[in-house]
Image (cartoon, helix red, strand yellow):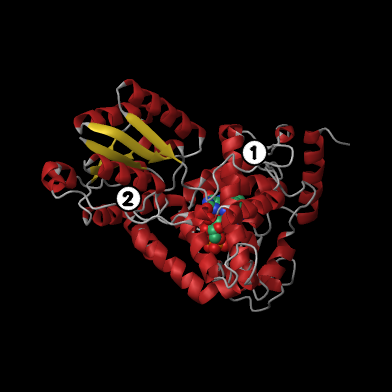
Amino acid sequence: KAVVHWFKSDLRTRDNRGLERASEKAREEGVPLIAMYIVSPQDWEAHLTAPVRVDFILRTLEVLRGDLERLDIPLYVETVEKRKEIPGRILELLGEWEASHLFANVEYEVDELRRDAGLVRACLERGMAMDVLHDTCVVRPGELVSGVGRQYSVYTPWFRAWVAHIHKDPTLLDLLGEPHKNPDTARQKYAKLFETTIPSAPDNKKLSDEEKKRFRSMWPAGEHEAHERLRRFLEERIGEYQELRNFPGEQGTSSLSVHFASGTLSARTAIRTAQDYNTTKKLDGGKEGIQTWISEVAWRDFYKHVLAHWPYICMNKPFKLEYTNIAWEYDDDHFAAWCSGKTGYPIVDAAMRQLNHCGWVHNRCRMIVASFLAKHLLLDWRMGERYFMEHLVDGDFASNNGGWGFSSSTGVDPQPYFRIFNPLLQSEKFDPEGEYIRTWIPELRGVDDNKAIHDPYGRGMATEAREKGYPEPIVDHKESRDRCLARYKEGLGRE
Ligand code: FAD
């Protein structure tokens, strides 16, 4: 007999609701706990998971295996090629292990919900139980409704309700410990499971040796690293978060998104720990940096609530269905220039090159390049959404879709369509000295004029830029702006 916890995007031992319940159940029944992770190359393909993210997950599994082993809990890892075969294989494994109970945390994307609903039924039919826990959000989706009983689609009132809800029930921020140690007999009984190895990445997700070296030094994996990063950020940098968070050239943000996305850090732990650093011990009072950071982490909850309530956003549809009829340009050359950071707009190019080099790019820059793609280039925002998923180490469907919806004005609580970021003004405001641009665009490093760096061809540095091979702007700002306004209006059927 045994109890099983199925790890998905919750790759940590501490403060993990599904794992904690599984551990309690195992102790109650006096049976061992087995942990399991299913690698599905087809799932990674379908979800466009970036190779850098796959590598991060596989490295995290090594750390997780070590942590569980200290508690005599085996982490069994198996590759199941086809995603539709996952539930069947899990049922077989449960049978082999004579498991009475399976635990897991919910993933709110449509395919995952369907898969888990089917598995709950199949377990019941076989006399086993499957418990699926809400864990990834601090407040579970569906809990917060507006005055008229509806899911919020605007962040600010949602955030007020979110804060009030947690203040009313502070136990939502109670943190859970590690699972109990398994009985001594587990090691012997499950000796084979303790021997499983973590597979290497499937061929289409493999990194080159150079990429491995680069990404591994940037993104150390695992739960301990996540806690250490959180601690350092709270002790050393959160005080300046409010001031610096919008400047991509500064190290103003936490860089914790990769840990939230793979579940090496829970949002609960992050918010609770940040709140404990605050003098007021409140979510929306006290030190400004802490308050603001908590409200940013809350965006992640918000977008997951939106996803859970409006699942059609998983099906390639814009949240605002009236934006379905915009006639996008499908210009391959423009898309290629955007992807490779060769649009001739330095701030856009710097951001895309940072994304390609690091698998991560600053939030301000994500907004600038997303707006540029959808509005200046009038390319279908889904092309950009896809490219981001294929390259981000922190790729998360709900946040990525939310960010693209915001920037292209087609999503929940978006920028109004007529607000079109001016890349030049954004660049001057958020990279005033041009340091960020010089870091990512070697061709412009020699431009020492802090005005010209934002627009070398328009501000007297054309010869230098051309000599170094930096491209001219692929579109004109004013013309693109006018084209965008006209096209959006036309799509919306407005005069
Ligand atoms: P911090 O500023 O330290 O924020 C702390 C945490 O709060 C982040 O780690 C993240 O979990 C959460 N957060 C902050 N801002 C947002 C936001 N706008 N939306 C949702 N959560 C937020 N974030 C992802 O995690 N995965 C994505 O795939 C993703 N795609 C995006 C695409 C676009 C077009 C845009 C505009 C934003 C996207 N974001 C995404 C949100 C945001 O850019 C990143 O979470 C942030 O840059 C991560 O850096 P950080 O951890 O240093 O952030």
- Residue 317 image offset from top left, x and y in percent: 63, 33
The reply to whether residue 353 is visible in this rendering is no
Is 470 rendered above or below residue 42? below
Task: Quadrant for the C terminus, please.
Answer: top right
Nearer the camera: disc 2 or disc 1: 2
Helix, strand or loop under label 1 = loop
Work out whether residue 325 or residue 345 is closer to the camera in this orientation and state it: 325
Instruction: Name the mark on residue 411.
Output: none
Give the Cα distance between marks 2 and 1: 36 Å
Task: Quadrant for the N terminus, please.
Answer: top left
Residue pointed to by mark 1: 330
Q: Is residue 36 left or right of residue 220?
A: left
Work out whether residue 482 or residue 476 is closer to the camera in this orientation and state it: 482
The reply to whether residue 148 is visible in this rendering is yes
Q: Is residue 175 left or right of residue 40?
A: right
Residue ID at (29%, 31%): 90
Q: For the residue marked with disc 1, what is the amino acid?
A: Tyr
- Residue 125 image offset from top left, x and y in percent: 34, 20
Work out whether residue 489 or residue 84 is closer to the camera in this orientation and state it: 84
Q: Is residue 69 left or right of residue 365?
A: left
Residue 469 appears in which quarter of the rendering? bottom right
Furthest residue to the top?
Answer: 125
Is 85 rendered above or below residue 241? above
Residue 93 appears in which quarter of the rendering? top left
Helix, strand or loop under label 2 = helix
Residue pointed to by mark 2: 58
Residue ID at (79%, 35%): 492
Work out whether residue 268 or residue 455 is closer to the camera in this orientation and state it: 268
Q: Which quarter of the rendered image does ligand 1 occupy?
A: bottom right
User: Looking at mark 1, is its residue's CB closer than 8 Å to ligand 1?
Assistant: no
- Residue 51 image offset from top left, x and y in percent: 40, 49
Q: For the residue marked with disc 2, what is the amino acid?
A: Leu
